[in-house]
Image (tube, rainbow, N blue to C red):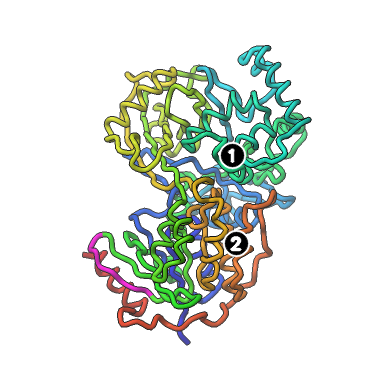
Amino acid sequence: MRQQTAVIIGAGPAGLTAACELLHRSDVRPIVLEKSDLVGGISRTVNYKGNRIDIGGHRFFSKSDRVMNWWLERMPLEASAADAQMIGYQGKSRLVDRSGPGSDLDRGDRVMLLRPRRSRIYFQRTFFDYPIRLSLDTVRKLGPWRMARIGASYARSSLMPIRNEATLEDFFINRFGRELYRTFFESYTEKVWGRPCSEISAEWGAQRIKGLSIGRAIKHALLKPLSRRDVAQKGTETSLIEQFLYPKHGPGQMWELAAEEVESLGGHVIRNHEARHLLTAGDHVLGVEAVDMRSGRTETIAADYVFSTMPIKQLVRAFSDQPPDDLRRISEGLVYRDFITVGLLLKELAVKEQGGLIRDNWIYIQEPDVRVGRMQVYNNWSPYLVVDPSTAWIGLEYFCNEHDDLWVLSDRRMIELAVAEMAKIGIVDPAAVLDATVIRMPKTYPAYFGTYDRFDDLRGWLDRFENLFLLGRNGMHRYNNMDHSMLTAMTAVDNVLAGRTDKSNVWAVNTEQEYHEAQEPETATPASAPCENLQSEEAVDADAVLDRVEATGAQ
């Protein structure tokens, strides 16, 4: 009986999760095509002279048991100072023993650290807790007059909320009041998206900070001393999480291990290969044409299933049978926001805490007179991200559009700008800079403007291809967290095993307050192939393609 093949476009969290799930639960062989030579997508870890950069910051936290188990099966929690440590989530508990199954004694570096979360806002050259706390310290820093305005504004929004909550500005005002929104949210959010909050859909807020408000923050602060520590922290809004799991050497470590797992189980992760065309017939995708980015050679791989995490704009362009003009205009009108990280290695920061390094994971730069949006302190994500623990290793994050004035700056000019801005706001002394690097990430954030208001029309056309599954952040043009992206992959594989062609359950991930979960399905063989082998003179067997790719890589 012919073995079925799934072509997976992109080796990020969604793509690699789908590959692992297929290998563990079916006889379908996954072939993962990755355009770059690195796996992990925007969740990869960049190694610069031994100092590691986490692009964007990735907390390993989920309200989904399924995702938590998936992570811990591959990277168990580090052993504590005691012989054993009990962790719990969603009412369940698990003992991690130094000498028992799942211990880190035989895992070397393949362990999860349990890290404290701390984020602050930097505003008017002063640090404020984030989430905002109605503490004496906050009152002192803001002053009684501004606090009175914030209180009155919040009361007004509570009593008379904006009924037609259409924009992100409406979303923030309804939850925080107009004054607090203008003080702490407006400038940073507009840095991220490059346009006023009044021009951004409220759906972004519903996806990213749903359920969070001043009232919930107060309740959380009051109940915190009475609550049990819980690794998953179910019932805690994402922006209020106070501890999280983190791979010892950064998020990319998880995905490098996942790629190794795919290869060891008989799947394939083919790097430096870009999916250029999808060959279709009727409501099926028959195969994927990929180009080797090194040699320029093009291969066509027959596919029984296709999982795509590539940006939808590029995916639609790749179809052999193009959609109607109005749908192509929707695709071409989708907007993305791009991302630059400037890594700075410093003798020390100009700002200190108890005489040493500040304890923040990241700091939101709310100052309107600089373009930097956020600062990460990599030392505080994991001490193993830094070669010399006596130095400060930070990431300065800029949000931009591909080919705009920031994007086209040379690395040297970008570093000069970052150092000058951090000196201007009093966080960095230029004389303390030891080294620096620049990383550019295109299409980091799918935006909820442009033609997004007509996205459902395009989705309907894409969903008609029965064996095509769109996954992840860019694959669905949805601002998902890493665990949401993984859940879309798991749900899509569930559908393959069940022979389900309706994709509504995949799109339902991250649309409600609780993450959608399913019972762990039994290992199964998927339904019969939805289509025959690609009928084309250019088509070749997947094994032949892999042989050629491996030969090319060995040259």
Relative to 485, is 5 above or below? below
Left-right relation of 28 to 46: right
Q: Which residue is mark 1?
A: 81
- Which range is magenta? 294-301
Left-right relation of 37 to 251: left
Lower position in the chain sequence, tag 1 or tag 2: 1
Q: Nearer the viewer, residue 549 or 253?
A: 549
Relative to 126, is 22 above or below? below
Q: Is residue 257 visible?
A: no
Within-10-Å neighbours for mark 2: few <14, some 14–19, many 20+: many
Amino acid type, mark 2? Val
Q: Nearer the viewer, residue 289 or 258?
A: 289
Relative to 308, is 5 above or below? below
Q: Quadrant of residue 276?
A: bottom left
**Mark 1 or mark 2: which is in front?**
2
Q: Which residue is mark 2?
A: 506
Residue 542 place in picture, x, y as percent: 37, 76
| Residue at 52% over, 20% down | 353
